[in-house]
Image: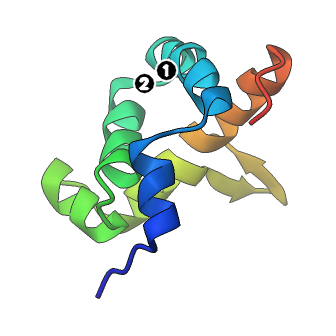
Amino acid sequence: LWFEASEDAQARLHPSPHLQRLLPPIMDLIGQALTEKQRQVLFLYYLNQKTQEEVGQILGISRRVVSQHLFGICRKGKQVGGAVNKIRKLCRQQGLEV
């Protein structure tokens, strides 16, 4: 079962002024820097609150591939790829700290 506390619902429905200011440039970064598949996975997982399994079923890919699109993979001890890592890096470069 899914539970959302009232303060969490408030934060989701009425984002803080700080978040309202950051959201447009972050959405621009998402639109410019991510592949179409990464955007689809990111939106389904975070905005539509689907599980990785559900995202995979919707897009016709495995849960493992969904995870790789979101968080990348570990190669030779180093994390590579992933939409979340890419957006975090770009946000830091542009001074968009959340």
Q: Which residue is mark 1?
A: 27
The quarter in which the N terminus is drawn is: bottom left
Quarter residue 65 falls in: bottom left
Q: Looking at the image, is 5 positioned above or below residue 95?
A: below
Q: Amino acid at mark 2?
A: Thr
The quarter in which the C terminus is drawn is: top right
Q: Residue furthest bottom?
A: 1
Q: Position of residue 38 (x, y in %)?
A: 42, 36
Q: Is residue 79 left or right of residue 64?
A: right
- For disc 1, the neighbor class at 10 Å (few under 14, some 14 to 19, many from 20) is few
Q: Which residue is mark 2?
A: 35
Describe the element under mark 1 as helix, strand or loop.
helix
Foreground disc of the pair 2, 1: 1
Q: Position of residue 93 (x, y in %)?
A: 83, 18
Residue closest to the eye, 2 or 20: 20
Residue drawn at x 62%, y 19% is 21
Q: Is residue 82 visible?
A: no
Residue closest to the eye, 8 or 74: 8
Q: Looking at the image, is 95 positioned above or below residue 55?
A: above
Q: Looking at the image, is 70 positioned above or below residue 52?
A: above
Residue drawn at x 84%, y 60% is 77
